[in-house]
Amino acid sequence: MKKLLVTVLLAVFGALAFAAEEAAASGGLDRGLIAVGMGLAVGLAALGTGLAQARIGAAGVGAIAEDRSNFGAALIFLLLPETLVIFGFLIAIILSGRL
């Protein structure tokens, strides 16, 4: 988990440095940072959803293996984290209006 966190932080700082460099060349820092924010909103939401679904899916399969009537509840719990990606995508769309 530490390696994943370090990788994500390095990617974020690298993207911020790249945005600052591009902004210095083009004259506007705000556009580059908005684009980085859009990418972070979708990317981190997808990463969080993937981690959540991995654990929920394993628990759901175990529950279904014990009792088949748990299928509906397991499916609903598996679909709940998908709202994170939808919210991240919505934030990216809102931010794209400011570009």
Image: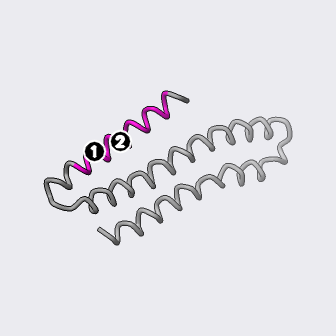
Where in the figure is residue 15, as x and y percent of width and height?
A: 31, 45
Q: Are marks 1 and 2 in contact (CB under 8 Å)?
A: yes
Q: How many marks?
A: 2
What residue appears at the point 71 percent right and 54 percent down from the top-left corner? Answer: 76
Q: Quick one: label 2, few (<14), some, or many (20+) residues within 10 Å?
A: few
Kind of residue at disc 1? Ala
Q: Which residue is mark 1?
A: 17
Q: Is residue 4 magenta?
A: yes
- Reply yes or no: does residue 40 show up in magenta: no
Above or below, 9 relative to 36 = above
The vertical placement of 23 against 12, above or below, is: below
Mark 2: which amino acid? Answer: Phe
For residue 93, which quarter of the picture?
Answer: bottom left
The secondary structure that dominates the magenta segment is helix
Q: Is residue 91 left or right of residue 81?
A: left
Instruction: Look at the image and tell me in which quarter the C terminus lies.
Output: bottom left
At mark 2, the secondary structure is helix
Residue 75 position in % (x across, y down):
71, 51
> What residue lies at 56% left-to-right and 56% top-to-bottom?
84
User: Which residue does the numbered mark 2 point to in the structure image?
Assistant: 13
- From the viewer's perspective, tell me whether residue 50 is left or right of residue 7: right
Residue at the extreme left? 25
Look at the image and give the residue range highlighted in magenta. 3-20
At a point 39% along the width and 58% down the height, the residue shown is: 38
Horizontally, is 88 left or right of 12 in the view? right
Q: Between 46 and 25, which is closer to the camera in this rendering?
A: 25
